[in-house]
Image: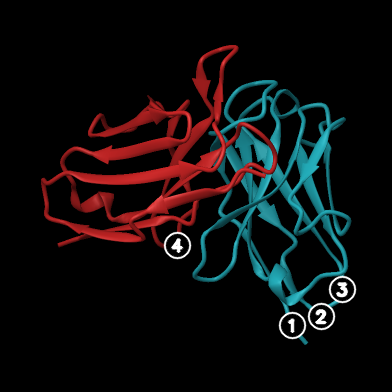
Amino acid sequence: DIVMTQSPDSLAVSLGERASINCKSNQSVLNSSNNKNYLAWYQQKPGQPPKLLIYWASTRESGVPDRFSGSGSGTDFTLTISSLQAEDVAVYHCQQYYSTPFSFGPGTEVDMK
Amino acid sequence: EVQLLESGGGLVQPGGSLRLSCAASGFIFRNYAMNWVRQAPGKGLEWVSVISDSGGTTYYADSVKGRFSVSRDNSKNTLYLEMNSLRAEDTALYYCAKGRISGHYGSSNIWGQGTLVTVSS
């Protein structure tokens, strides 16, 4: 099974500053046949279901602001919020869908400093 | 509007059974794989199960294998999760989630609001 880890567990960022979250898998989630990383990022606000932000590690879902970006390949990935807004306070989860079980990371809580 | 609506949660004793449903609307249900994902109170997300668009292929997390069974009725646009031999550690909010790409497993772009399952005596 692929195990996902995230760092940090939580971070506090000032309004307008950059936030970066790391996600690592213990096996590569890169499919060499199509050169796609099977990695997604979700945002979850209190009392709400998760919302898909990024898929294929770096493709923004429709309607997601361009201050959100995903990068990385293989086993190491990063979600970056270029300029934190108040509405970005949430928990962020990464998920691999390369192989079942489609495991999630433990989540990173982003708060406003 | 694309929508998923879970139901069937509740309080059940350890060892008991429960059947969750997820009613889909606003998209061609039979074209998409569907997932169940759960979240214990104050915890992270745990993937539970996925079923292919036709219903012919299913996968489960080790923690529920042999106890839970996922199925779907494409004529009723409904996804199910049959849960047996329930344990305290199955207590969670259960979400159904739609696969993003038709015909493929992968990320989930539509999620329901969840239904709460509490396993306690």
Give the residue furthest to the bottom.
B121
Circle 1: residue type: Ser
Q: Position of residue B86 (x, y in %)?
A: 81, 70
Circle 3: residue type: Gly
Would residue A70 appear left or right of B32 to someone viewing this image? left
| Residue bearing the label numbered 2 | B13
Check if mark 4 and mark 2 are on a common chain.
Answer: no
Check if mark 1 and mark 4 are on a common chain.
Answer: no
**Could you tell me which residue is drawn at 54 percent across and 29 percent down?**
A38
Circle 4: residue type: Gly
User: Do tag 3 and tag 2 residues touch (Cβ < 8 Å)?
Assistant: yes
**Could you tell me which residue is drawn at 67 percent across and 23 percent down?**
B104
Question: What is the display colour for chain A?
Answer: red
Label 2 neighbourhood size at 10 Å, few (<14), some (14-19), many (20+)? some
Question: What is the display colour for chain B?
Answer: cyan
Q: CA distance from mark 1 to mark 4?
A: 23 Å
